[in-house]
């Protein structure tokens, strides 16, 4: 049984897809068409070869080989009598497999989406194919090429390299059209304007007479300025459009009649442009790379701020529920005390009843003040400033005998409830920090307003003595304890001299307390018939 395959042979199944045959024909036609407008110093079929391998998945590479061999067959079969069958076969056999091998070796770099690897692919393909072509020509041609070997290497390497940089970036741009967003109207207009300017410079340079070589060279160098501008503004996309256009204009305006002809003046310009194009592609790749990194960091920071703001809102909602529960407990205690007082008065214990009424009033007021410290319900109806002046915070500050009368300006009711609650918590924490860490009188200032399209609040907690400086421990503690809320609401924290300055602003809507209707707060602690218990 084990030797059946030896006796019966191997059965191979070969599927030929019509789409693959069409791809092979299209590739051969593209190579033939681009060769008609190519020169030794500007060889576009090399670019078609690399671009096709980059565009097509590996399962279609055999069809590219078929198209390559069909293209070489129609071109080189008539050359057998002049150059020999051995050279025709060997020189046509290795070029596409070398490019496929180079692209395969760069597959990890390609998957990393860093486009600087394209320069490595272009250089490797141009050098290897040129060296093998010239070595085969020197060895197998009956009459070796007339030009020196090193001159041929430089000329053909530059031609292949420019051809690859002309078509391969466009192929990559097309292959990644779905992964990257399309430019907007203004960006598209910028690209079209830069390309039109390059065409104007190129056509003008081509119209100059041969004796105006200096002016022609200057205009050709000026063509690089729009490409540089596109690279700096649009990164890799700008370079992938600008560099091929630059190479194409210079190549097509080179005054040479056919493949094999050579123009020394244009070749010097093309060498400069080849180096410039490679530098622009690398620069554009790095610009795009760092732009994406900054965008990811920006998105991450924005998400972190949004989550922090949502966390603060969720915490306030939890405290609101607790305050509501405490209010219900306080109402139950007041109701029970009222029943006891009524019973005592009915039994004739007038003095005991009056004493109990006074005690119940004092403790009920303190209970409500402490409840308002848990959640300042006055913020939802009457605003931040009322919560600071009439709630339990005022009582606590007055007991310290160190807080001067706060200076509160502006209308806090123009701000969202979430921002007012964050400002309330931050201001209380800042005052508490100075009470614990510093000595002397403290002054509190707050101002609400609008700057541009943003509404916000600026708060300052300062020592009255201007000569007294905040200690480093106080500054560090302020940064650790207060920066979270200020950053979550698009603000900042600054500790200077004797003061802590806090700013907060509206940063967009989130699931917050702002959706609460006024009726929803009627039963919250601190509200009875539109009044507050101070």
Image (cartoon, helix red, strand yellow):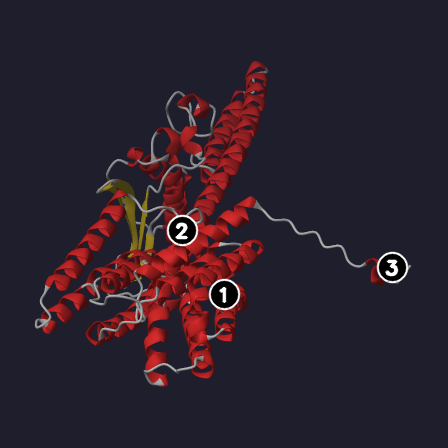
Reading the image, the residue beneath label 1 is 96
Residues under numbered marks 1 and 3 in contact, where contact means CB atoms less than 8 Å apart: no
> 67 left or right of 479?
right
Reading the image, the residue beneath label 3 is 4
Q: Residues within 10 Å of mark 3 (few under 14, many from 20)?
A: few
Q: Residues within 10 Å of mark 1 (few under 14, many from 20)?
A: many
Q: Is residue 345 above or below residue 155?
A: above
> 63 left or right of 208?
right
Earlier in the chain: of badge 1 and badge 3, it is 3
Give the SS element for disc 3: helix
Q: Is residue 337 above or below residue 123?
A: above
The alpha-carbon separation of the residues under discs 3 and 2 comes to 50 Å
Residue 502 at x, y percent in the picture: 32, 52
How many numbered marks appear?
3
Reading the image, the residue beneath label 2 is 174
Residue 255 at x, y percent in the picture: 20, 67
Give the SS element for disc 1: helix
Q: Which is more toward the observer, 422 or 2?
A: 2
């Amino acid at each position: 049984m084990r030797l059946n395959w030896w006796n019966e042979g191997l059965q191979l199944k070969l599927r030929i897809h019509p789409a693959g045959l069409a791809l092979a024909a299209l590739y051969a036609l593209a190579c033939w068409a681009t060769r008609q407008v190519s020169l030794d110093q500007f060889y576009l079929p090399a670019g078609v070869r690399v671009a096709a391998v980059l565009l097509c998945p590996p399962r279609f590479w055999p069809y590219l080989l078929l198209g390559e061999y069909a293209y070489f067959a129609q071109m080189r079969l008539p050359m057998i009598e002049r150059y020999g069958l051995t050279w025709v076969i060997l020189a046509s056999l290795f070029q596409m497999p070398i490019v496929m091998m180079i692209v395969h070796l760069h597959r990890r770099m390609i998957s990393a989406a860093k486009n600087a690897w394209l320069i490595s692919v272009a250089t490797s393909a141009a050098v290897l194919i040129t060296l093998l072509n010239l070595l085969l020509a020197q060895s197998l041609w009956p009459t070796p090429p007339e030009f020196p070997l090193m001159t041929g290497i430089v000329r053909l390497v530059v031609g292949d390299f420019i051809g690859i940089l002309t078509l391969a970036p466009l192929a990559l741009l097309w292959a990644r059209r779905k992964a990257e967003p399309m430019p907007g109207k203004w960006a598209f207009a910028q690209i079209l304007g830069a390309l039109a300017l390059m065409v104007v410079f190129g056509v003008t340079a081509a119209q100059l007479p041969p004796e105006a070589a200096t002016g022609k060279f200057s205009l050709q160098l000026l063509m690089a300025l729009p490409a540089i501008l596109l690279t700096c503004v649009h990164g890799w996309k700008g370079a992938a459009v600008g560099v091929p256009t630059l190479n194409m204009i210079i190549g097509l305006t080179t005054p040479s009649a056919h493949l094999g002809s050579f123009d020394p003046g244009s070749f010097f310009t093309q060498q400069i442009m080849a180096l410039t194009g490679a530098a622009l592609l690398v620069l554009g790749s790095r610009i795009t790379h760092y732009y994406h990194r900054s965008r990811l960091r920006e998105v991450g920071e924005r998400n972190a701020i949004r989550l922090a703001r949502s966390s603060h809102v969720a915490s306030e909602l939890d405290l609101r529920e607790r305050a509501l529960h405490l209010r219900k407990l306080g109402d139950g205690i007041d109701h029970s005390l009222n029943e006891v007082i009524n019973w005592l008065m009915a039994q004739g214990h007038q003095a005991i009843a009056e004493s109990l009424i006074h005690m119940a009033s004092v403790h009920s007021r303190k209970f409500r003040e402490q409840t308002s410290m848990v959640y300042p319900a006055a913020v939802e109806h009457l605003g931040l400033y009322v919560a600071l002046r009439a709630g339990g915070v005022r009582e606590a500050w007055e007991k310290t005998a160190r807080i001067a009368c706060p200076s509160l300006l502006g209308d806090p009711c123009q701000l969202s409830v979430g921002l007012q609650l964050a400002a309330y918590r931050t201001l209380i924490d800042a005052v508490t920090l100075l009470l614990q860490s510093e000595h002397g009188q403290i002054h509190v200032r707050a101002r609400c307003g609008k700057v541009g399209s943003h509404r916000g609040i600026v708060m300052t907690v300062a020592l009255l003595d201007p000569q007294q400086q905040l200690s480093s421990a106080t500054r560090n503690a302020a940064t650790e304890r207060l920066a979270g809320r200020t950053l979550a609401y698009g603000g900042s924290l600054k500790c200077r001299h004797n003061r802590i300055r806090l700013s907060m602003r509206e940063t967009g809507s989130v699931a917050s307390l702002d959706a609460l209707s006024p009726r929803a707060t009627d039963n919250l602690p601190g509200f009875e018939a539109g009044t507050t218990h101070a």
